[in-house]
Image: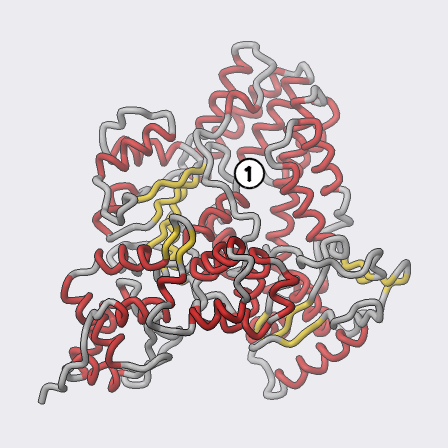
Amino acid sequence: MPRPFAKPAASPSPLRYRVLGPLAVHRDDRALPLGPLKQRVVLATLLGSANSPVSVDVLTDAVWQEEPPRTARKNLQVYVSALRALLADDELDRPRLIHTGGGYMLRVAEDELDLLRFRSLVRAAEGQGPRPAARLLRQALDLWQGPPLGDDLRLSPRLAEEAERLELRHLTAYEGWAEAELELGGAPAVVEGLRDLVERHPLRERLRSAWMRALSGSGRQAEALAAYDDYRQLLARELGLEPGGAMAARYRMILAGDDRAGAGAARPPAAPPPDLPDFTGHGEELRYLTDRLEDEGAGRIVLLSGPAGAGKTTLAVRAAHLLGDRFADGRLCVSLRDADGRTRSLRAVLAELGERTGQAGLSGPEAWREWLARHRVLVILDDVPDESAVRPLLPCGGLGRVLLTARGQLGGLAPVDRVCVPPLGTAESVQLLAGLVGEGRVRADREAALRIVRACGGSPLAVRVSGMRLAVLRHVPLREFADRLTDPAGALDELTSGDVSVRRWLAHGWEALPEEWGRDAGRLAAGTGEGPFGLTEAAEALGCDERRAVRVVEALIDAGMVTSPCGEVTAHAAQYELPHLIRLYARGSGLGTPTPVLT
């Protein structure tokens, strides 16, 4: 979910938005008329991505389930214009609803939108003791006033999916609140509420486990044991599975008469790396990713692909933190490369997985896959070099999920749900930079800030390194740093802060390429101009005919060195692009020179 807008509106704000219940907007105590259904769909879609750009295509898809009319874009402009007037606030020095490059963005402060406040309270409860966690989660749950978005807006499939995601977030928060109350000895207060939710979500293991604890804590051990047995039979009948290790441990403790069967018996074996507090952008990819990993009927392997520095690992870690309640047996992240970019041996990776999951001395991949099938865990296998390095570690079924990150597409793996991580947009990059160097500094010279982020080519890593460097070099004006970055000869030398180097990151990716692919990528960098290029330009740069050029370019796409547009196009109509930083690295290192075309 996008971050709350960094600078809140004037306080106290006269506007209050509600999506955790029927859609509503109040100015002071007066409900505003939100207009016809399609206009309300636009508003709900913008609120679901508050403070992040929403493309015209996404809005069109939300408003018109069938083929949109020819006047769709004009109709959207009418709805947006009406909403802009409705939400205007004279106390603000800038508009709330703004036009972005390819869509619109609604600026909302955290205290204005119940959803942002809910998510903030849930985040604040993470890592707290049971008493503050119970208080914060209770405040979050009290924000709900019925099924999210109401019934009429769910006629839009996109909003129906959003409502389902919100309901799942509500359920997860309720589970967390109930567990905290159980730690405080409040079993009788939560047992009946948990019973109702178990009836509606019979296969949700965390919910069933909390209900067992509540029954046992209320002196109803026989019912707690029966609840486990019912669940075991249901799971075997519906999915052919056994309950997870945490659930089975709790059952054994209750069976042994230990009514304290609590979170201590079921702590996850490991946690992911810390989440970045200033995570920015990639909202659509994050929502899709969390949906797929939460969906019981989806595949068990998801791949995030993109060039070095695209933000794949950051995105994977953010998803792991958001889904912590979904994977009760743990979340962990293991890299498949060492610090120098070399591929780690399967034995070394298995040893780390065994240590992180309490299974020291795993006998081999089969033992790992067996453990993975029995546990509700999310395993991030980071920076996968190729299919052979990861194939023995992938699940064949069961409860565990695996999230891969790789520069290439790993085309030899199937079935895998693939998600391409695109570059950050300009607005998102500026937001990330401002969070590192200060909004005032960016506001004072926005033109220079724009030049900096454009020189970073949409790479979150490059923007972050620029921000970290500028945060130290307080005496350096943004304009001067922008001049340094726009000099191709020295740009990569500037993208270094402490022990974090964009050049070293790119070099690791290049060194992992087969020698021939590296030469071809260098020739493309030397022989094509900045921006997209077609097949003819690629053939000229490579010094070959177009048939071989297609094979070369597609191999480099698989390796994460070249990007291509989405959609079905013929090879001759396709446009390709070398990411800006990869082009700079290749040219600065003298990798490849233009070669005469073969005749």
Quadrant in the picture for the C terminus: bottom left
- In the image, what residue type sits under mark 1? Asp
Quarter occupied by residue 443: bottom right
Query: Furthest-left residue in view?
Result: 599
Residue closest to the eye, 529 or 2: 529
Residue at 45% in and 39% down:
272
- The image shows residue 274 at horizontal and vertical percentages of 49, 41
Q: Residue furthest front?
A: 475
Visible residue check, residue 163: yes
Q: Is residue 471 left or right of residue 273?
A: right
Instruction: Check the image and report above or below for 300 versus 479.
Output: above
Q: Position of residue 245 (x, y in %)?
A: 44, 26
Q: Quadrant of residue 593?
A: bottom left
Residue 20 seen in the figure = no
Vertical position of residue 215 compared to residue 156: above or below: above
Whether residue 477 is situated above or below residue 165 in the rendered picture: below
Tell me which colouring the rendered structure shows: secondary structure
Taking the spot 45% from the left edge, 67% from the top edge, the residue there is: 458
Camera-side residue: 489 or 208? 489
- Is residue 522 placed above or below 201 in the rendered structure? below
Would you name the residue on which mark 1 appears?
Answer: 325
Q: Residue at x 79, y 73 (%)?
A: 35
Toward the viewer: 395 or 476?
Answer: 476
Q: Residues within 10 Å of mark 1 (few under 14, many from 20)?
A: some
Image side of residue 553 versus residue 179, left or right: left
Indicate the position of residue 164 as horizontal and vertical percent values. 61, 53
